[in-house]
Amino acid sequence: MKKLALSLALIMAVAAFAGCSSAPSSSAPSSAPSSSAPASEPASEPASEPSSESAAAGDVTLSSSLSDIMDTVLASVPEDQMPMLMPADLNGGEKYTALTEENSEYNLGVTNDRYAEGIAADAAMTSVPFSVCLVRANSAEEAEQLAADIEANADPRKWICVEAESKIVDYSGDVVILIMTGADSAEAIHAAFTALAE
């Protein structure tokens, strides 16, 4: 019995350490662009067509619901780079996690009284650095400062074992996006967001 317990403990410890080392981490700053300037240049073409679950890209604008905007920008991520997202049963039945007083600073680095509403799409496994947050500022005039504060305070090392390769903050109108993930996925998501700014 003791051997079985010891064996199980050893297997769990090895699995925990393997999960923590599954993505390379670097203490050097990311070389990926990190911008809080307004989205003004549209992407020539999105990386892929939106999924059938999300609204067609032509129907979604920045005045659409944050959930529809999130569906559209996440559809740009190649399927082989898209992690499994936090399931709805852990999000109060919602597709994306609502940003609240309890989780706003963890996700964005700012308190939730700084914006009207917000949602996050996070990987279900914390060993996968993938987080996309959309917030609707209290007004378009406040969006630039909100984006700058998120840029200064959002932590790409918020996960226990890994760090996001790329951190991009951008805004258009009253919508601010924070993207923390791998460089290729981050660029695809940012291009899709920029295309919506047209």
Image (tube, rainbow, N blue to C red):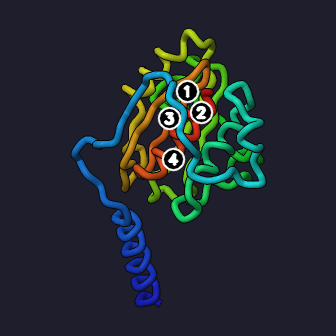
10 Å neighbourhood of mark 3: few (<14), some, or many (≥20)?
many
- Front-most of residues 41 and 119: 41
Q: Secondary structure at mark 3?
A: strand
In contact (CB < 8 Å): disc 1 and disc 2: yes
Using residue 55 as the reference point, say whether residue 74 is left or right of it.
left
Which comes before the other along the chain, label 4 or label 1? 1
Q: Report, in whole angstroms, how far the alpha carbon at label 3 lies from the one at label 4.
A: 13 Å
Quadrant of residue 101 in the image? top right
Of labels 3 and 4, the one closer to you: 4
Q: Report, in whole angstroms, how far the alpha carbon at label 4 lies from the one at label 1.
A: 16 Å
In contact (CB < 8 Å): disc 1 and disc 3: yes
Quadrant in the picture for the C terminus: top right
Residue that label 2 marks:
134
Q: Amino acid at mark 2?
A: Leu
Q: Report, in whole angstroms, how far the alpha carbon at label 1 lies from the one at label 2.
A: 6 Å
Horizontal and vertical percent position of residue 23: 36, 61
Q: Amino acid at mark 4?
A: Ala
Which comes before the other along the chain, label 1 or label 2? 2
Q: Secondary structure at mark 1?
A: strand
10 Å neighbourhood of mark 4: few (<14), some, or many (≥20)?
many
In contact (CB < 8 Å): disc 2 and disc 3: no
Horizontal and vertical percent position of residue 151: 40, 28
Horizontal and vertical percent position of residue 1: 47, 90
Q: Is the residue 140 above or below the residue 18 in the image? A: above
Q: Is the residue 58 above or below the residue 22 in the image? A: above
Which label belongs to residue 83? none
Residue that label 1 marks:
176
Residue that label 3 marks:
178
Which comes before the other along the chain, label 2 or label 3? 2
Q: Amino acid at mark 1?
A: Val
